Amino acid sequence: MPVRLLRLMVLCVVVSAAGALAAALALASSSKGAGTREGGAAAAAVTVWAGPPQTIAPPHGISKQADVLAFFPGAVTITAGQSVSFQFSGFHTVTFTGGKKTSFITPTGSARQPLLNDVSGEPMWWVGKAPLLGLNPAAVPQVGGATISSVSQIRSSGVGRIFASGNKPPKAYTLTFSKPGNYRFVCLVHEGMRGVIHVLPSTATAPSPDVATAAIKSQAVRVIADLRRIQSKNPTEPRTVWVGTGKLDGAEVTSFYPRRLVVNTGDTVKFVAHDPTDSHTVTFGPAAYTGQIEKTFVSAKGINPFGAFPSEPPGPPAPITYDGANHGNGYINSGILNPYADRQPAPHLIRVTFTRPGTYNFECVIHPNMDGTIVVR
Ligand SMILES: [Cu+2]
């Protein structure tokens, strides 16, 4: 694979440890409706959620694998001097990039992958060729103080607070906007997550916080409708597995569609990215082996190359021939599939030809409980 292609593939990577839509999606408290407050009067901080608001109860019948990669609400209007409290529900950042492009996973310097073998004792193709991958150091700690006064300033919640939170909700990130402007922000982990804080002069009349609450509620209604529509849809093409499913507004289900597929010996199955907001992998092998890759996908050592890279060397697109004993134990990997197929030269699908009857399990090593089975007759 040309180095440029590999770089682009690496840079477009997004990771989510979010998993299930733990939150509810029907606002528990009802909005009192939109109002206004007098300019200059002290106002409570407006809340913006990164991920599905935890203030909302999960509606009946939504998949446990559902998630929403979006800010709630995506746009908020305040006046200069007011604060926004960002709450976290999932593996996200709130980052004001100052207009610069930043990625979450990057090559760490010029170092190449060290010698690592598959179970049969053969070195993987990426040894000495592909770069070491790690988290962008700028993405981990909080960057900047508690105030922002210009759209060219960089401020970031960092993902450190998510790592540090354990099972508790991560610490909120509160930012005071001291000057007017349109402050755009992103999640460094999920490219599709974007939002904006419109800051009016301090003398202007800002909408009541109820406006933001109402916006969250209507956004939740839309997303729930999306989830209901997408969560039960399967591919119409035969011998095809969708790798995740989702909508551009952030609704996603981290599942394979179908989760179990029966084919005949000699059939070729296409696994194709179908979630426009997130990245996934298709990783075959014994559960203990792929589970360990999932557990160490992101660690202090960086990104696990057995999860990030395709198991087969780059070349013209061709199906992988699979007999259940590839690489000594049945390991094969798509590498991180690119959801933005139209924009980036990275793998968007893999094809696997099954040559031996058996039951073969696979999983996505990025998302918990994203598992599937191919039964070959
Ligand atoms: Cu996944």
Image (spheres, rainbow, N blue to C red):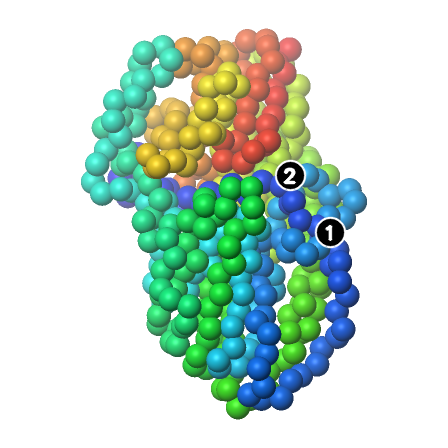
Q: Position of residue 272 (x, y in %)?
A: 54, 35
On screen, residue 218 versus residue 42, left or right, reads: right
Q: What's the residue at 57%, 63% (across, down)? A: 48
Report which residue position mark 1 lands on: 57
Q: What's the residue at 65%, 45% (across, down)? A: 22
Give the secondary structure at mark 1: strand
Q: State the image quarter where residue 9 is shown.
A: top left
Q: The disc labelled 1 sits on which kind of residue?
A: Ala
Image height of 103 relative to 215, above or below = above
Image height of 328 relative to 365, above or below = above
On screen, residue 243 versus residue 182, left or right, reads: right
Q: Position of residue 241 (x, y in %)?
A: 60, 31
Q: CA distance from mark 2 to mark 1?
A: 15 Å
Q: Residues within 10 Å of mark 2 (few under 14, many from 20)?
A: many
On screen, residue 225 versus residue 107, left or right, reads: right
Q: Residue furthest left?
A: 110
Q: Residues within 10 Å of mark 1 (few under 14, many from 20)?
A: some
Q: Position of residue 316 (x, y in %)?
A: 37, 30
Q: Position of residue 136 (x, y in %)?
A: 33, 48
Q: Earlier in the sequence, mark 2 or mark 1?
A: 1
Q: What's the residue at 59%, 28% (across, down)? A: 371
Give the secondary structure at mark 2: loop
Q: Which mark is residue 65?
A: 2
Q: The disc labelled 2 sits on which kind of residue?
A: Gln
Q: State the image quarter where residue 107 is shown.
A: top left
The quadrant the N terminus occupies is: top left
Q: Is mark 1 within 8 Å of ligand 1?
A: no
Judged by depth in the image, the label closer to the viewer, 2 or 1, is 1
| Nearest to the observer: residue 264 or residue 186 | 186
The quadrant the C terminus occupies is: top right
